[in-house]
Image (tube, helix red, strand yellow):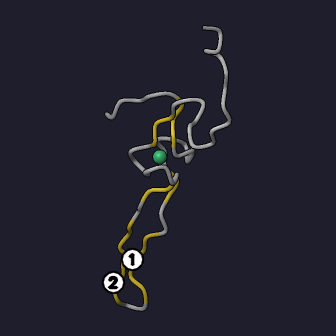
Amino acid sequence: MDDEDEEDELDEVPGRLQTICPYCGGGGMVADPKLTIVGGSPRTVDNGRSCGHCKTVGHFPGIVPPL
Ligand SMILES: [Zn+2]
């Protein structure tokens, strides 16, 4: 039994575990709707903003339990 460290090249299986950021869902950006007045009428503008939880990376190394 000496073939335990044999590594197959499987791209579908990551070599290390990562946790997707629950805030942005892995996109690194979160919704940030703002109510603004454009031309005298109220409108909702959502430019989004960078996720401060994961620093826009979208995931964390290892397993991070949900808060
Ligand atoms: Zn995030």
SS class of the residue under badge 2? strand
- Seen at 65% across and 9% down, the residue is 2
Give, as a three-letter code, the residue at label 1: Thr
**Looking at the figure, which quarter contains the C terminus?**
top left
| 52 up-or-down from 40: above or below | above
**Looking at the figure, which quarter contains the N terminus?**
top right
Observer-nearest of 66 and 34:
66
**Residue 44 found in image quarter:** bottom left
Observer-nearest of 7 and 32:
7
Give the residue number, with chain letter if any, for mark 2.
Answer: 42
Q: Position of residue 27 (x, y in %)?
A: 51, 54
- Seen at 49% across and 68% down, the residue is 47
Q: Position of residue 36 (x, y in %)?
A: 39, 77
Q: Residues within 10 Å of mark 2 (few under 14, many from 20)?
A: few
Q: Position of residue 19 (x, y in %)?
A: 46, 36
Farthest front residue in view: 1
Tag 1–tag 2 contact (CB < 8 Å): yes
Give the residue number, with chain letter if any, for mark 1.
Answer: 36
- Seen at 55% across and 43% down, the residue is 55
- Seen at 50% across and 56% down, the residue is 29
Q: Which mark is residue 2?
A: none
Q: Is mark 2 within 8 Å of ligand 1?
A: no
Measured in 3D between alpha carbons, the distance from the residue under mark 1 to the one under mark 2, in whole angstroms, is 6 Å
